[in-house]
Amino acid sequence: MSGLKQELGLAQGIGLLSTSLLGTGVFAVPALAALVAGNNSLWAWPVLIILVFPIAIVFAILGRHYPSAGGVAHFVGMAFGSRLERVTGWLFLSVIPVGL
């Protein structure tokens, strides 16, 4: 059995960012958004990309400087200690059912 592979490619990084920040619901309900907002719902995508881009850059920089399989929880742990790292991990785990 091989060891833990501690690297993410571009596709994996995009997937993690989109599901953890945007949630999977944003991909599942575009028809509902079009019903509610009409043609203005098309503007939501470029606005969302502009708003999320700085966050993506921060995660890219953190991931490059502090590579770890722990992700956001690891970064929180480095900044604020192991207690908040565990809390962050559990919070990320607890939102999975909401995003589905």
Image: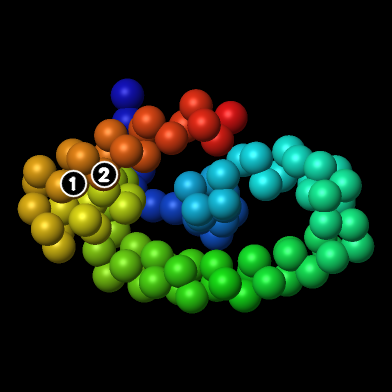
82 relative to 45 in the view: left or right: left
Q: Residue at x 32, y 67 (%)?
A: 62
Q: Is residue 91 above or below residue 73?
A: above
Q: Is residue 39 above or below residue 29?
A: below
Q: Residue at x 81, y 42 (%)?
A: 32
Name the kind of residue labelled 2 in the image.
Thr
Q: Residue at x 36, y 39 (%)?
A: 92
Which numbered dot is residue 11?
none
Where disc 1 sits, the SS reads helix
Q: Residue at x 64, y 66 (%)?
A: 48
Q: How many C-alpha atoms fall within 10 Å of the one at disc 2: few (<14), some, or many (≥20)?
A: some
- For label 2, the residue is 88
Which percent across, then down, holds residue 70? 28, 46
Q: How many C-alpha atoms fall within 10 Å of the one at disc 1: few (<14), some, or many (≥20)?
A: many
86 relative to 41 in the view: left or right: left
**Closer-to-camera residue (60/32):** 32
**Closer-to-camera residue (43/71):** 43
Q: How far is disc 1 from disc 2 in space, using C-alphas? A: 5 Å
Name the kind of residue labelled 1 in the image.
Glu
Which percent across, then down, holds residue 79? 15, 62
User: Does residue 32 appear in the picture of this structure?
Assistant: yes
- The type of colouring in the image is rainbow
The image quarter in which residue 28 lies: top right
For the residues labelled 1 and 2, say whether their Cβ atoms are less than 8 Å apart: yes
Which percent across, then down, holds residue 52? 55, 67
Hey, which residue is sitting farthest front in the picture?
A: 36
User: Does residue 4 appear in the picture of this structure?
Assistant: no
- For label 1, the residue is 85
Which percent across, then down, holds residue 8? 44, 53
Where disc 2 sits, the SS reads helix
